[in-house]
Image (cartoon, rainbow, N blue to C red):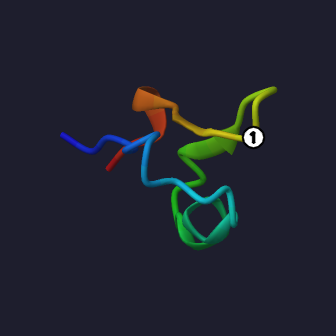
Amino acid sequence: MFEIDKEKCIHCGLCVKDCSPKALQFNDEKIPVIDEKKML
C-alpha cells in the first residue's frame, strides 16, 4: 500500500509528475492524494 507522509511532504509536485498511472493529484491544500482505482 502506498501512502503520502503529509508531515514530510514539501509540496514540490515530483510525485504527481512522476506517477506513471496518474494516480496522484493535488488536493486544495496542495497535498498529493491517491486515486486507488488508478494504482497498478
Position of 18 compared to 7: left or right? right
Q: Is residue 8 above or below residue 30?
A: below
Q: Residue at x 69, y 66 (%)?
A: 12
Where residue 10 sits in the image (x, y, percent)? Answer: 60, 59
Q: Residue furthest left?
A: 1
Q: Which residue is mark 1?
A: 30
Q: Amino acid at mark 1?
A: Lys
Q: Residue at x 64, y 39 (%)?
A: 31
Query: Which quadrant would the N terminus be assigned to in this image?
Result: top left
Q: Is residue 36 above or below residue 22?
A: above
Depth check, front residue: 12 or 33: 12
Where residue 25 sits in the image (x, y, percent)? Answer: 67, 42
Q: Is residue 6 above or below residue 40?
A: above
Depth check, front residue: 19 or 14: 14
Q: Is residue 38 above or below residue 16?
A: above
Q: Residue furthest right?
A: 28
Q: Quadrant of residue 28?
A: top right
Element on which disc 1 rests: loop
Q: How many marks?
A: 1
Q: Quadrant of residue 39?
A: top left
Q: Residues within 10 Å of mark 1 (few under 14, many from 20)?
A: few
Q: Residue at x 27, y 45 (%)?
A: 2
Position of 30 compared to 2: left or right? right
Where residue 18 sits in the image (x, y, percent)? Answer: 57, 73
Q: Residue furthest front?
A: 7
